[in-house]
Structures are given as structure tokens and as C-alpha cells.
Amino acid sequence: MNNLSNLENCFYDFSKSKSFPECITSIEIPNGIIEIGDNAFYEYCGITNIIIPNTVIRIGKNAFAGCSSLKNIIIPDSVIEIGNNAFSWSGITNITIPNGVSEISYGLFGRCESLTKICFGDNITKISPGAFFDTAFTKFIIPEGISEIGCNAFQACHDLTEIVIPSSVINIGNEAFLYCQKLKIINYRGSKEQWRGVHKGDHWRAYCPEDMVINYNYKD
């Protein structure tokens, strides 16, 4: 493994240093680093694996965006914030969000065309706009506790056929499921009356199948 080990400060913005040799495919961030800065590894296409220490508390916006070969990354439990588009256009296939994170930020996994599995932490309350735009999920389970599905959150998820929405959701944003052309089943954990009370933005299900079925009081 080719390691980056020459970072001397416990707070370091990687985006100030953009001189990674092309031969580096795996990076181990040293223990003691508390922030991975904005655009830190932006479009480093050769990186396949990154090890993040449990001292990191923040991952900046676009930190791993465009890392198309990045397949494996474990976010430690110490992380409490993940910035906008941090993993967009990357090659990740699965990911676990730690309990300290409360929001799936704007465009976080947008155009992660290989992403098929996500494990949510216990404290997520919001899926922000464009968070899962054009991902490869076929079934998606939104956990209880999330209250908002942002605009375009699942737009262009062309393989998505089924989604589970918890009764905690009170707002579905504009075009949230736009162009989900295979999305035929919404399993809603609340009652039909509760579903009627959910605010649904303009064109929230535009270009979805006309014969979409909504199942109420859904249980696994």
C-alpha cells in the first residue's frame, strides 16, 4: 500500500496539496487528522481504496467527487458531517453512514452509478436534493426518522422498481422521483390518511409508471 504519511498537523486541508503521483491507488490517512477538506481528492481517478482514521470528524464538499475507481471506503463513527457532493461521480458500490451524521447532504451520491447498497445511521432526518440522483438501486428502504425527501433526490434512478417510505416523512420535494421509469411500487409505512397529509411537490413522480401502486401500512 502506498501511504500518505507526511502530514504533520492534526488539522489539514488536503485540497491545498494536489500533487499525488499517478501510481498511488490506495491511501491511508494518518491518525490525528480531523478534517478532509473540500475538493481534497477531487477527480483522482486512480484511487481505489482509502482508509480514514477515527479522528476525522468532517468530510468536505466534493472531497471524493469524481474518484471513478474508488470502490471501497469505510466512514468511521467519528464523522459527524459529510459535505455536498462528497462522493458524487465516484465508483463506490456500498457505504455505511455513521450515527453522528444527521443529513444526507446535497448531491452526496449523485451519479454513483455502481452504488446499490447503503446502511443509514440512526440519526438521519433528511435526504437532501439530488442525494441519490442516477444511482443503481433496484429497491430502496428509507429508514424511520427521516422527515424530508428533497427535490430530485432520486431523479433518474432508472433501475429503481420499489421504495419503502416511513411514516415519519412529511415532505417529498419537487421531482423527487422524476424519470424513475421502473418505479412501480411505493410501500408506505403509514396509513392512507397519513399519506394524504404528506406534502408532495410539483411533479414529484413525473415520468414514473402510470400503474404505480402505493401500499399503505407496509411492514417488512
Image (cartoon, rainbow, N blue to C red):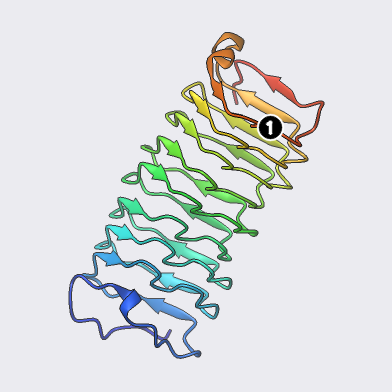
Q: Quadrant of the N terminus?
A: bottom left
Please state if 11 lies on the left or on the right of 91 as rendered.
left
Label 1 residue SS:
loop
Amino acid under disc 1:
Arg
Please state if 181 lies on the left or on the right of 115 as rendered.
right
Pick the residue in front: 71 or 15: 15
Expressed as whole percent of the image width and height from the top left, the position of residue 43 reads 51, 74
Circle 1 sits on which residue? 205
Residue found at the far left of this picture: 9
Q: Quadrant of residue 172?
A: top right
Expressed as whole percent of the image width and height from the top left, the position of residue 178 reads 68, 40
Please give the name of the residue rendered at 82% of the width and 26% of the height, measured from the top-left corner.
211
Q: Quadrant of the C terminus?
A: top right
Above or below 184: residue 178:
below
Above or below 52: residue 125:
above
Q: Quadrant of residue 206?
A: top right
Residue found at the far front of this picture: 202
Q: Looking at the image, how many numbered discs can be counted on the residues?
A: 1
Please state if 137 lies on the left or on the right of 64 as rendered.
right
Please give the name of the residue rendered at 65% of the width and 52% of the height, measured from the top-left corner.
134
Pick the residue in front: 77 or 155: 155
Expressed as whole percent of the image width and height from the top left, the position of residue 61 reads 40, 61
Please give the name of the residue rendered at 47% of the width and 58% of the height, measured from the top-left corner.
85
